Image: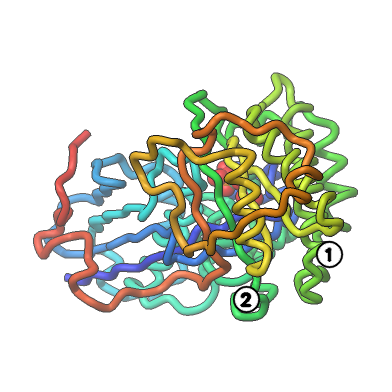
Amino acid sequence: MHTVTCIAPVNIAVIKYWGKRDENLILPINDSISATLDTEQLCAKTTIMASPDFKKDQIWLNGKEESINKRLQNCLLEMKKRAQVGNEVLQWKLHICSENNFPTAAGLASSAAGYACFAAALAKLYKVEGDISAVARAGSGSACRSTMGGFVRWHMGSDPKGSDSIAKQIVPACFWPEIRILILVVNDERKKVSSAVGMKRSVETSEFLKHRAEHIVPKVANQMEKAILEKDFEKFAELTMKDSNQFHAVCRDTYPPCVYMNDISQLTVELVHEYNYAVNKTKVAYTFDAGPNPTLYLQEKDVPEFSAVLDHFLPPPTDAIIEYKKGIPVLPVKLSLDLLKKINLEQQLPGRFKYTIHTRVGEGPKLLKDDKDHLLNNRGLPVKDTKSV
Ligand code: DP6
């Protein structure tokens, strides 16, 4: 019997991946760039146990037994191809247990962390060295960028089989330690079109997406990489916001349209621009994935003031049942009347956001060596209570 447990991070793209040229192999139509977030605040944790006694592969996700889907099977197949032949563990069935340290209902990209974690744990189990980004990619495209820390670029590659469609680190987390990320979780119960379905529809119907992938992203991805290498925050921020706006314009151009942002998302966009205009500098950037939650990139020195601005215009709920400000603590500051006057936005009712998470750029997946960290007991069953399907 062999057991391994890993944790893996979430990543938030600043140049978005949207569109596949091969649906089965998950090969994208453009490069994308993201920052990996610190696992301290957001991570997936996965235990894999291999045993000659297990009758079948089984998986429990966030406390519920699920079926092993095609994407998980693809990851497993890809990792087995890379493992040493003759490794007897390869023949054994697996029990897998995975959970996130944040609510899935938050609508945060949990699949990226989940598949990166699965790939990282499989690599340890089968003693596979080297790149695992292509294995994580077989589960979910954006997951390949969660297999390493810092700022990461997923190169689309040109091989029809996908051998060169891999992620590479631009810089490690310690290169630009001043960067902070604020995730604002909105109250929104609408049913959304999943990324996979949305991007397929965009590829089929949006001429604008084709233009973006062929003529815009190749240029802006290089500009983004340069801004990161030069730690040019203003350029980084501008490119981030423009790319997010363009991605959502593509979603609108899709037929039928995919609308991911809501009125609170739009208010946040306005607030960020108003604030940057008032301070005469691009200090804050927003970006939105396939959902309404704003993710803000800013520098450590600007967090206290901007947080106070946010609390003023989009106040926390008055009856917060759960902790509103999660993550790295923020020092409270008193805002100048002059600044508030310069920001041309109406103060909103409290509670437009459920809670916020303040985090930083972090490292890639990690192996947890303590037996206490395993999510499966020595019989291969979840340590915590589970619901069966
Ligand atoms: C908007 O990686 O979830 O977050 O490859 O079908 O699993 P699949 O899609 P997924 O798409 C992520 C889209 C995005 C942009 C990004 O993270 O680059």
Q: What residue sits 45% from the left and 60% below the top?
A: 327
The residue lying toward the viewer, choosing from 298 and 139, is 298
Residue underneath mark 2:
177
Give the number of the disc on residue 222. 1
Picture layout, residue 86 above or below residue 13: below
Q: Residues within 10 Å of mark 1 (few under 14, many from 20)?
A: few
Badge 1 element: helix
Give the number of the disc on residue 7. none
Residue 181, given in percent of the width and then of the height, sits at 59, 59
The residue lying toward the viewer, choosing from 87 and 287, is 287
Q: Amino acid at mark 1?
A: Asn
Q: What residue sits 50% from the left and 45% below the top?
A: 108
Q: Is residue 132 left or right of residue 6?
A: right
| Res 155 → quadrant | bottom right
Residue 370, given in percent of the width and then of the height, sits at 23, 77
Q: What residue sits 46% from the left and 52% below the top?
A: 325
CA distance for labels 1 and 2: 21 Å
Q: Is residue 14 left or right of residue 366?
A: right
